[in-house]
Image (tube, rainbow, N blue to C red):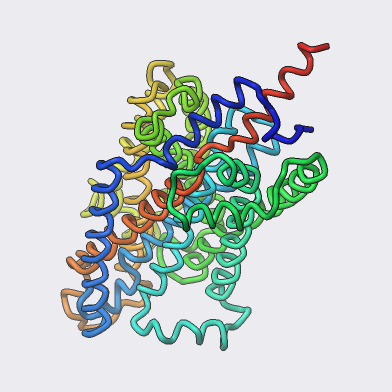
Amino acid sequence: MMKNEHTLADPFNEKVEKDLLAHLTSNRRKGRIFVFVLIAIILVGLFAYYRQLRYGLIVTAMRDYTSWGVYIANFVFLVAISLVGSLFSSILKLSKATWSTPLTRISEIIAIAAIMCASIIIIVDMGRPDRFFNVLIHGRIQSPIIWDVIIITTYLTISLLLLYISLIPDLAICRDKVKNVAKWKRWVYKVFSINWHGTPEQYKILHKISFTLSVMVIPVAFAIHTVTSWLFSTTWRPGWDSTNLGPYFVSGALMAGAAVIIVAMYFIRIALNLKEYLNDKLFDHMGKLLVMLSLVYLYFNINEYLGPAFKMVGVEGEHIIELFFGKYAGMYWMVQIFGLILPIVVMIFKWGRRPLPMLVLSFMILLGAWFKRFLIVIPSLQHPYLPIQDVDESYRHYIPTWEEWAITCASFAAVLLIITFLIRLFPVIPIWELKEEKESNSKPNQK
């Protein structure tokens, strides 16, 4: 167990603290401009939402056929991104993959930001957001909607606890070492470090709580995307009547989560000058992990469409034809080729797992993941088993309005703003865990 970290005079510890605390006191102009742009996008989205509240959902392109539009695609995508928290802070940590240590806090921050904004986008999707509390008051356990509310709340709570518990030793370091910051920041470091002094007893309690939360979050994380898939599979629509949707959603979420971590790694290591910690070897590890997750998702993709494509029965057949050869064919094959197959092929080679190629491929995967959610939601709704008779032609098409796009952009800007705020407030790489690893690795040499 580590000794009191503040009494150590180890050069390694001093260097780690200096490197990983430096950004907390810097005030770069580029960072302020980035935050200003995000806030501007959010304000435009708020104006669009004001119009939606004032005039109703008629300002959107959603109608009786396409009652779920781009908002639900955003919700499913953000829930998928949030799964990255459990992948790195729990699955890899419990499997003793020490190479992932620099990524645990980044993944936890992304998970919290994504699940918070996913919760908000569901309220945005409601024509009467004031009736949200009716879901809690009059919710029925038979409905997957109430399951979704419960599981999202549980996952957010555990994710917040995971982040906070792992932050406590580093908050104490900030309390003692970071002086040239605003008073409210010093207050945060002092209050939330809860009298941490790095004693063996405190570390023992910390490890026990972290282990418990890491175990708890895995089934909850898998359940959150499985329950989301049940929202689709219990709604009778072509393309959704499948028992494959649960693992299909989970595997796609793990792939998208790994891709978003790579994008975050690339920009954080440049913006905060952390190339020594987020190094090329780490990108290589992430590339191998992403290939494995992509292959699993490719299997479920084939499994999802092969059965209906063999049968081609009724409306299911119409849905498949529209995806493969119809008006959504361009988007569908772009997702499969550029968002899945091409990244796998490139990342098999070592040069494809270098930082810049990995950034480009991860962007492709994330774009493909979002368009994939769009394809899951929209085409199915436009092919109901019981079509409405003499329906207006506009009901048969769905092109999001500027209000929907503005709110969509604002939701992603809000995710980035939350991530930026937390990174500016806390060390983005766990200092105390790097110290522990250094100490445990040096013990065999001492013998």
Residue 378 position in % (x across, y down): 31, 63
Residue at x-position 59% and y-position 35%: 431
Rendering quarter of residue 354: top left
Residue 106 position in % (x across, y down): 50, 42
Callout count: 0
Residue 203 position in % (x across, y down): 76, 42
Residue 176 position in % (x across, y down): 59, 42
The reply, left or right, for residue 414 in relation to residue 155 is: left
Specify the quadrant that holds the C terminus. Answer: top right
The reply, left or right, for residue 445 in relation to residue 426 is: right
The reply, left or right, for residue 191 in relation to residue 109 is: right
Task: State whether residue 61 appears in this view.
Answer: no
Pick the front one: 135 or 320: 135
Residue at x-position 52% and y-position 25%: 285
Residue at x-position 70% and y-position 52%: 195
Task: State whether residue 198 appears in this view.
Answer: yes
The reply, left or right, for residue 301 in relation to residue 102 is: left
Pick the front one: 104 or 92: 104
* Up/down of 145 relative to 342, above or below: below
Specify the quadrant that holds the N terminus. Answer: top right
